[in-house]
Amino acid sequence: MREQQMLDAAVRIFGQRGYMAASMDEIAELAGVSKPLVYLYLNSKEDLFTACIRREATALTEAVRAGVRTDLPADRRLWDGLQAFFAHTAEHPDAWSVLHLQARTHGEPFATEVAAMREEIVAFVTHLVAVAAREAHRAPDLPEHEVAGLAEALVGAAESLAAWANTTPGVTARQAATTLMNFAWSGLGNLMRGNSWTPPTADA
Amino acid sequence: MREQQMLDAAVRIFGQRGYMAASMDEIAELAGVSKPLVYLYLNSKEDLFTACIRREATALTEAVRAGVRTDLPADRRLWDGLQAFFAHTAEHPDAWSVLHLQARTHGEPFATEVAAMREEIVAFVTHLVAVAAREAHRAPDLPEHEVAGLAEALVGAAESLAAWANTTPGVTARQAATTLMNFAWSGLGNLMRGNSWTPPTADA
Amino acid sequence: MREQQMLDAAVRIFGQRGYMAASMDEIAELAGVSKPLVYLYLNSKEDLFTACIRREATALTEAVRAGVRTDLPADRRLWDGLQAFFAHTAEHPDAWSVLHLQARTHGEPFATEVAAMREEIVAFVTHLVAVAAREAHRAPDLPEHEVAGLAEALVGAAESLAAWANTTPGVTARQAATTLMNFAWSGLGNLMRGNSWTPPTADA
Amino acid sequence: MREQQMLDAAVRIFGQRGYMAASMDEIAELAGVSKPLVYLYLNSKEDLFTACIRREATALTEAVRAGVRTDLPADRRLWDGLQAFFAHTAEHPDAWSVLHLQARTHGEPFATEVAAMREEIVAFVTHLVAVAAREAHRAPDLPEHEVAGLAEALVGAAESLAAWANTTPGVTARQAATTLMNFAWSGLGNLMRGNSWTPPTADA
DNA sequence: AATGAATGAGTGTTCATTCAT
DNA sequence: AATGAATGAACACTCATTCAT
């Protein structure tokens, strides 16, 4: 309906220009409606931006969730999730820009919003790590925040690779996913097997 | 001298508010000087921002370089570099915000500036990976852009962990470094040994 | 409508303060509207000034044209034109200041604009001179640029007298016109009759 | 001395940029001195501009005076004065711009200054007209303000022709002077002879 | 006699936001 | 349900002017 057109326009403008450089005039024009109408449906620029973040965050998590079948083994689930993630971000670069760049660049209200999505994904990955450990018949003896850190790293790597894959010619989403899978899975596997790298002692 | 005070203030304001939301008035006030003086030393908002980026990029790469001793083995060098990286970003969160978020969000002149630094770091890591392979008496039979992707992933993971460590209470730079080392080093080791994860075929 | 109020105000301020010293704030205030509205209707200070010049140039040439009946003899036409010119400039001193002083003092875009009007008037006068010669059954044997010079001189004299009549108490537009007619017409007549003044030779 | 260098620079900058667009920085730089020195010798931008006007007004009137020999007949004196006028303005275009355009464009203090010079010249011409009448053994039965008007017109024509001659290629100062002489002298002569042009009555 | 260093006040311009309809 | 018309508040930037030396 009308509101979706506005959000479409807003995501496009916000994604390309950035939050501050985006003008409500431009958004209204691209949406094909008058400016007061934008204010009628969404109350302010802040609210509009928040709505964009929420919609796109949901869309992204939905896309990842939809790509994963719970009846498959953990590595396959991770692979499928990554595939879905890279595919979605590649198909919706403006949305990804809003989530990954713009929202985090502008203070509290927005960063919080996108952090929620991020935590959801991190939780999903954390869960997979745990499942992988269970499937390997090996209790994850890693401390809890170690697991959280691993997931955080994995997600960060994925985000970085998404930007890399979207801007580097000749690199496809599939390749990015493969690279990350290689990197992550064998790393995780090693950890599961207890082969952890030990930092040098302070006096070394 | 006077110019450094201004850059200090600018980094703080840019880091917290973002490039566009930062006002020259506020920067001048925080620096304790008049606005025209800021324009006398640094010519425009753009130039001021560029100067911030350059100074902080140099500071960060210097900090990492200073933390690494070339006479130590590759894993130790990576560990030390990560330590230095996490420590520096933890100590200078506004500078890190400028480099990691603000600079990349605002058009060509700035993104290019920070991309140069990033590439330097990626090159550093790529180099370490190669050295690690040599030290393991094993030629890295990975294709070149696979190596680039790995470095990209590693740097992205580091960036993500930096934010995580800086905002999550109870997580230190050392722990972040440990987590990443565990994740990365063993993953890389696996890859060096040829244990790569194979994606499922399309029809699977 | 609204735009005319703004132009009225702008002509007044520009005419009194000059282009550069005039502030958009003052113009908006005098027009009784907000500054953004001025920018909405007329795009910039430059455009606003150009619009003033164009409007007043048109008004002045229209006034002169309207004062002249083509079915009357040349001297009467010149007289009527002068009357109209002096009357109009006396009634619109700010407009005259804009055209005669301000527009010519500020760079290419504006000087060109007003030069067009001036040339139109010079052409009008040149035409009258030629007609006068024809009516006197005497081909104007003056070289072409001599005629142009005469017209230029006449217009300059008129401009000067306009300022004089507008600022000297007790001098009316009619008197100024009479003075100039006396001066010019008999001078022209003399020239038509071949009574030209010969400059002394270099060695005299 | 030092002050003259500054005035030279100021006249050049004021003449080219206009009063408001001229910056004290630029003037000081062109004069080869520091800005505070300019303020030490001449107190403010206004005073500096006034000093420029005064110096150049004096220089111009001096030049005209110097070109005229009191022992020659009136027409020759007028011719010589015009020659000197056109020559001086052609040689010092920036000074002429300051006097003719800039000074009159910017409010009271300056316009008054240049008006004084103008009146001096007008008085000079008025005097010549009177002498011419005496030499023709003919009392000037023209009313006083008629004479003033004639002089005003003549000066205006001269000013206009000066600009025309300085900007139109192929027109020399001498030609301009000849044109004006032709125009003026025969006009004046006619008037002296009582051949005045009579305006139509109101009911005509 | 001369200046390097500094600023208060003001400029044109833009934009999120709101009435009146 | 929708908009044309309007504005308050802010921004980047400049410049005449003045100290401290």
Image (cartoon, coloured by chain):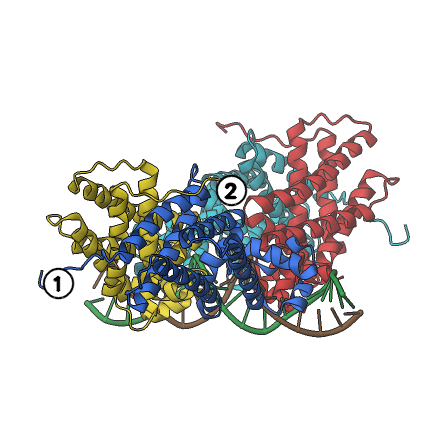
Chain colours: A blue, B yellow, C red, D cyan, E brown, F green
Query: Taking B144 as reference, is A10 left or right?
Result: right
Q: Chain of mark 1?
A: A
Residue D5 appears in view: no
Figure quadrant of the C terminus of chain A: bottom left
Mark 2 surroundings: few (<14), some (14-19) or many (≥20) residues within 10 A? many
Q: Are marks 1 and 2 on the same chain?
A: no
* Picture residue at 55% right of the left edge, 67% below the top: A46
- Residue receiving disc 2: D85
Residue that extends furthest to the right in the rendered view of this protein? D203
Residue C70 appears in view: yes
Q: Nearer the viewer, residue B154 or C148?
A: B154
The residues bearing labels 1 and 2 have C-alpha atoms spaced at a distance of 94 Å
Q: Chain of mark 2?
A: D
Q: Nearer the viewer, residue D87 or C189?
A: D87
Horizontal and vertical percent position of residue C115: 64, 42
Horizontal and vertical percent position of residue D124: 55, 50
Query: Taking A77 as reference, is D174 left or right?
Result: right
Residue A49 location, quadrant: bottom right
Q: Depth-wise, is mark 1 or mark 2 nearer the camera?
A: 1
Query: Taking D193 as reference, is D106 left or right?
Result: left
Q: Amino acid at mark 2?
A: Phe
Is residue C192 depicted above or below E9 in this figure? Answer: above
- The secondary structure type at the circle numbered 1 is loop
Horizontal and vertical percent position of residue A144: 32, 68
Horizontal and vertical percent position of residue A48: 58, 65
* Picture residue at 73% right of the left edge, 53% below the top: C86
* Picture residue at 31% right of the left edge, 55% below the top: A188
Q: Amino acid at mark 1?
A: Thr
* Picture residue at 75% right of the left edge, 55% below the top: C87
What label does residue A201 carry, if any? Answer: 1
